[in-house]
């Protein structure tokens, strides 16, 4: 006959341990010290086995019966309830130690061979800058969509809309990795994408894409009353396709394989090695020699440099400021030149 909750409450300790059966293999086990626990007796693969569900009254009678029915379902599927219970406990322990930072670094380590060194470094820097300080110590199982969105909002508030979207993708990839490892059941980062701010269309930068128009621009600059060094700077911009700030800060020591003493000597191996410190890179990358930028120099580029060398070759900088030879010319000098000649944004 099934037990009642009153019988469970009133069960007293005796000299020896004893059982109160509820049916279907479920019984309340009462020890000689008065401790009560729910247990299930069953057979699997021809052997009698026992499974402890939990203590009474922490685990109530109704809940113990639910656990019994779940165990019987597993037996019908030819699965051992004790083994399944052990797997659940192991998964719970693993999830508790599976923090965002721990699993995030594991994911990065397993995937980085697929990426370039530069991309791998940028990715881990993004996690260390935006994700780990906010969610790093939390178990993945405890992180939900609103928590991820709150972290991404901080990135948006500093104006980095693109970065927020990329970071969401990184976090989502960490969760997908954790799902495959059996640590979490779903990816909460997947649902917050549409809640992020849209990328505002950027104004297109002015660009001359027709060669005849580019030649016309340079002829206009050559015929202007501008400083000769500034005119040559405009020509070098077209020939090297670097940023104006990079060109204005260039130093003669960055150019190799050019014989400045012989203007007629060919320089087929001429190259401009721009240090990483002056490139548009992440701060940590600026100290790495591997990120320096090499610009091969055409014959026309070398000729332009030699013309400029006669003007500023005795100074460290290609384009010194008019106020001090130790400071580079401002990019505004070229921008103002283009404006004066009718080329505006």
Image (cartoon, rainbow, N blue to C red):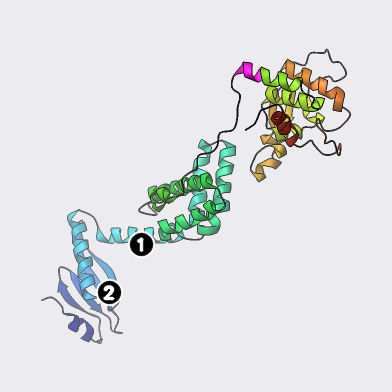
Q: Is residue 14 left or right of residue 247?
A: left
Q: CA distance from mark 1 to mark 2?
A: 17 Å
First of labels 1, 2 by sequence position: 2
Whether residue 286 is visible here, answered yes or no, is yes
Q: Residues within 10 Å of mark 1 (few under 14, many from 20)?
A: few
- In the image, which residues are magenta? 200-215
Residue 71 appears at what percent x and percent y?
A: 22, 62
Q: Nearer the viewer, residue 168 or 41?
A: 168
Residue position for label 1: 89
Q: Is residue 141 left or right of residue 66?
A: right
- Quarter in which the N terminus is drawn: bottom left
Residue 207 highlighted magenta (yes or no): yes
**Looking at the image, residue 3 lies above or below residue 285:** below
**Looking at the image, residue 227 lies above or below residue 76:** above
Residue 100 highlighted magenta (yes or no): no
| Label 2 element class | loop
Q: Is residue 167 left or right of residue 307?
A: left
Whether residue 47 is visible here, answered yes or no, is no
Residue position for label 2: 59
- The residue under the point 27% across, 74% down is 59
Identify the main secondary structure in magenta: loop
């Amino acid at each position: 006959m099934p037990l009642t909750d009153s019988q469970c409450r009133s069960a007293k300790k005796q000299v020896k341990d004893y059982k109160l059966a509820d049916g279907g293999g479920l019984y309340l086990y009462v020890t000689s010290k008065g401790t009560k626990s729910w247990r299930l007796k069953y057979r699997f693969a021809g052997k009698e086995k026992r499974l402890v569900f939990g203590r009474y009254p922490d685990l109530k009678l109704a809940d113990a019966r639910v656990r019994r029915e779940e165990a019987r379902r597993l037996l019908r599927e030819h699965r051992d309830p004790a083994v399944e219970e052990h797997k659940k406990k192991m998964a719970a322990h693993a999830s508790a130690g599976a923090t965002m930072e721990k699993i995030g670094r594991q994911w990065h380590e397993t995937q980085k061979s697929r990426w370039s060194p530069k991309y791998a470094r940028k990715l881990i820097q993004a996690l260390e800058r935006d994700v780990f300080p906010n969610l790093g110590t939390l178990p993945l199982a405890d992180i939900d969509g609103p928590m991820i969105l709150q972290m991404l909002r901080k990135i948006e508030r500093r104006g980095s809309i693109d970065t927020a979207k990329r970071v969401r993708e990184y976090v989502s990839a960490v969760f997908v990795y954790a799902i495959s490892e059996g640590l979490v059941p779903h990816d909460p980062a997947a649902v917050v994408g549409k809640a992020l701010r849209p990328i505002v269309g950027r104004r297109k930068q002015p660009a001359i894409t027709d060669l005849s128009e580019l030649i016309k621009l340079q002829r206009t600059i050559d015929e202007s009353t501008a400083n000769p060094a500034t005119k040559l700077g405009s020509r070098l911009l077209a020939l090297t396709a670097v940023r104006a700030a990079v060109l204005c800060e260039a130093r003669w020591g960055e150019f190799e394989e050019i014989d400045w003493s012989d203007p007629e000597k060919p320089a087929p191996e001429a190259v401009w090695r721009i240090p990483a410190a002056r490139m548009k890179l992440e701060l940590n990358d600026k100290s790495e020699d591997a990120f320096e930028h090499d610009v091969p120099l055409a014959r026309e580029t070398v000729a332009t440099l030699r013309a400029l060398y006669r003007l500023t070759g005795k100074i460290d900088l290609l384009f010194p400021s008019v106020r001090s030879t130790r400071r580079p010319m401002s990019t505004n000098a070229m921008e103002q030149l283009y404006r004066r000649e009718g080329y505006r944004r």
